Amino acid sequence: MNRDLLHITHVLECIARIGRYTADGRERFLAEDMVQDAVIRNLQILAESTQKISEKQKAAPRSGMANNRGIPQRAGAQLSRAGLRGGLVDCRE
């Protein structure tokens, strides 16, 4: 399998998982540490996979990635606003 296709597949799988994990809404997400951990981990995998996609593929007009370089940073900012960033740091200590 083409490496870019493998990484794009990982991105799509992470998006699907995050969608499933958050389908019950914000309240459940905020109430359950395991759901938060699963979402955060999938965001990490997603970010890693997007960084491994070749520059040629990212620049392709149909890829839709040329304007999305800041996705991992924006995801981190959203976690921080939701009060979850500190939880991630605490887990690593």
Image (cartoon, rainbow, N blue to C red):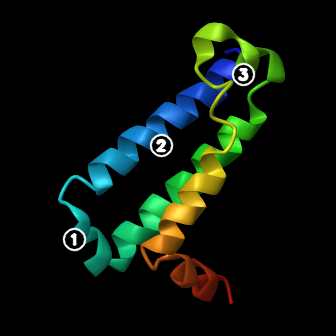
Circles 1 and 3, Cβ within 8 Å, touching? The answer is: no
In the displayed structure, would residue 11 be above or below residue 84?
A: above
Residue 85 location in percent, x, y?
55, 76
Type of residue at label 1? Arg
Residue highlighted by disc 3: 58
Residue 75 falls in which quadrant of the image? bottom right
Closest to the camera, between mark 1 and mark 3, is 3
Residue 26 falls in which quadrant of the image? bottom left
Type of residue at label 2? Cys
Question: Which residue is drawn at the image coordinates 58% and 20% (left, top)?
Answer: 64
- Look at the numbered disc 1 and give the secondary structure of its residue: helix
In the displayed structure, would residue 66 be above or below residue 46?
A: above
Residue highlighted by disc 1: 28
Quarter in which the N terminus is drawn? top right
Residue 16 location in percent, x, y?
37, 39
Residue 14, numbered circle = 2
Q: Which of 85 and 40 is in front in this view?
A: 85
Q: Is residue 22 left or right of residue 72?
A: left
Residue 13 location in percent, x, y?
46, 36
